[in-house]
Image (tube, rainbow, N blue to C red):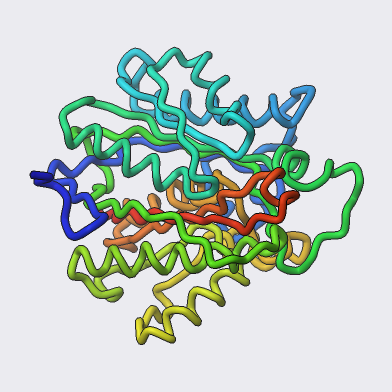
Amino acid sequence: MAANLIGRQTIAFNGLPRLVSAYTIVGRLEGQGPYRDFFHEILDDDLVGQKTPEKAERHILEKAVNEALRHKGLAPQDIQFYISGDLLNQVISAVFSARSLGIPFLGIFSACATFAQGLGLGSALLQGGFADRVVVATSSHYQTAERQYRYPVELNIQHRPTNQHTVTGAGACVLSLEGEGPKITHATFGKVVDMGLKDPNDMGSAMAPAVFAALEQHLQDTGRGPDYYDLILTGDLGRQGLKMLRILAERTGLSLDSRLQDGGALIYGGNPKTGAGASGAACSAVMALGFVNAQLQAGKLHKVLLVGSGALLNQLTVQQGDSIPTVAHAVAIEA
């Protein structure tokens, strides 16, 4: 019998894994936004002296992990598993960082929901007694994502208002059953949801139903209402996707009010250069490990539900006319 499974899709972590150390790195544009004071490091150069943006992304991911370890006085050999992913083919940023770190590697992919998935999986490893410490990290880079999913930035292609701007950054954290830090109490792993939407320039609308499904399932499994949480932070729906999520909630009578916010809609502060807001595997990571973690540590927030969302498309599926499968994972974090 699955003793820690409650309801249909939620794991309860009775061992209360803790987020004992974290480090966030963001690019120049993210560092100009209203949450700049919550990030540990803001880059002066988004290429960090590297020849290509792909090399830059793996560099900042590796640095985020090393800094998260250093802040806790840990070395790579103190970690049993490294759980990481990104947006690029074969999660190459995570792979190359794992090559350098030398920690047993679990590469994962849920697009922009990868960080929430990693938190849940890392907590499950700790809860099951399979590890003492786990590192979870994700990264993304505006230029690498544009080159892979759209066009090289040198072409200066005009984006639509519903387009989102991929966060340049990386976030890494150490999870442990021992030490001080916010507790991870539950993880609700979502199902793949596809409502038939095909526009890759409006991923927020495509992802909103998956976020609603994961949120609704989490509340049903735990027997909680939305008011249990001080903040429900979705990963990167952007303003368009957040609007769609509110419509879905209203239609079912689920009252989310102002406690529902979206990291993608917040991080740039409405900068017109960023379209509908942010996306990227680093988006929810830097907002959760930067802003949310700081607020929990300071006692300004007590209970937060992070709902990461991901659009599981690639270049070929778009070219072949497929719709966009999406997924969302919810993780409850408490002070």
Q: Report the residue at 71% width, 44% height from top.
A: 315
Residue lying farthest to the right in this orientation: 155
Q: Is residue 169 visible?
A: yes
Q: In which quarter of the image is the C terminus?
A: bottom left
Q: Report the residue at 79% width, 22% height from top.
A: 51
Where does the image place residue 238, in percent across and percent down from the top left? 60, 65
The answer to which of 315 and 46 lies nearer the viewer is 315
Where does the image place residue 216, in percent across and percent down from the top left? 33, 69
User: Above or below — where is 23 with respect to 211?
Assistant: above
Q: Report the residue at 28% width, 76% height from top.
A: 227
Q: In which quarter of the image is the N terminus?
A: top left
Where on the picture, by quarter, is residue 79?
A: top left
Q: Is residue 38 visible?
A: no
Where on the picture, by quarter, is residue 200?
A: bottom right
The answer to which of 314 and 247 lies nearer the viewer is 314
User: Above or below — where is 192 with respect to 211?
Assistant: above
Residue 89 left/right relative to 157: left
Where on the picture, by quarter, is residue 10?
A: bottom left
Where does the image place residue 5, in percent across and percent down from the top left? 17, 50
Q: Report the residue at 21% width, 64% height from top.
A: 221
User: Above or below — where is 220 with respect to 41?
Assistant: below
